[in-house]
Amino acid sequence: MAELEVMMPLPELISFLSSLLQRVAISNDLNPKLHTQKISAFHGLTRPSISIQSYLERIFKYANCSPSCFIVAFIYLDRFSQSQPSLPISSFNAHRLLITSVMVAAKFMDDMYYNNAYYAKVGGISRAEMNLLEVDFLFGLKFQLNVTPNGFHSYCSFLHKEIWFQSPPLERPLNLHCSFHEDESTNCLSIFGV
């Protein structure tokens, strides 16, 4: 089976993805045009008390999914947002969207993954709710789960640039490597940072 690979400091990736998701949620919360957004299964009655960063770190700690899953989960969140414009990411739904996107990415990408009950426990929701969120998320994505090597490479390039530009000059990451392997000698895509 083909494998997508990400080699970069994973804590930096987790920190950046959570920061990006937090900024999107805050921006959407403040946008008055989005206050009439459709309420979905992903919406909580209140904002969760755990920050998006702490939540994603918890998922990272307990989900044991491959680094590629976090990139693919980000791609899924982007696709979901594009295909469901009436459900923008907000502080009321970001956590549920995040746990669901990581779970779906792990199931699609990894050979070994945990079941829905485990992800529900990690995410602080019930198994029944996790099952419902998974189905809603898959329909929201129109079951388009495949990520091409070029698509994966594009998102890695975007994330690398964003991480690089947001880091202070002396702390900028020096190396990001994203590749697609069908076998070791062909079909490799790579990016190397400055």
Image: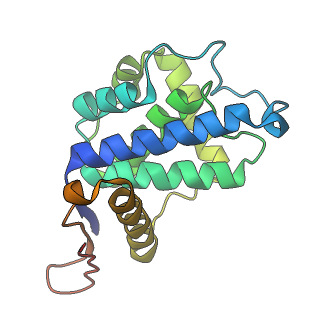
Q: Is residue 111 visible from the viewing direction of this image?
A: no
Q: Which colour scheme is used?
A: rainbow
Is 154 drawn above or below residue 171 in the view shown?
Answer: below
Taking the spot 62% from the left edge, 24% from the top edge, the residue there is 92
Residue name at image x 33 percent, y 23 percent: 118
22 relative to 9 in the view: left or right: right
User: Could you tell me residue 182's position as x and y percent?
Assistant: 25, 76
Q: Who is closer to the viewer here, 13 or 169?
A: 169
Q: Which residue is most to the bottom?
A: 186
Placement of 31 over or under 156, stated as above or below? above
Q: Residue furthest front?
A: 169
Residue 166 in the figure: left or right of residue 94: left
From the viewer's perspective, tell me whether residue 29 is left or right of residue 48.
Answer: right
Q: Where is residue 161 in the image (x, y as percent from the top left)?
A: 39, 66
The N terminus: image quadrant: bottom left
Rendered-image quadrant of the C terminus: bottom left
Find residue 158 and report its horizontal and vertical position in percent. Answer: 44, 66
Asked if residue 18 shows in the view, the reply is yes
Residue found at the very far left of the displayed protein: 184
| Residue 21 picture location, percent across and down | 50, 41
Q: In this picture, is 164 found above or below 135?
A: below
Residue name at image x 26 percent, y 47 percent: 12
Front residue of 37 and 42: 37
Picture quadrant of residue 165 = bottom left
Count of marks overlaid on the render: 0
Residue at the image point whose x is 43% and y is 17% from the top: 50
Q: Which quadrant would residue 30 be assigned to in this image?
A: top right
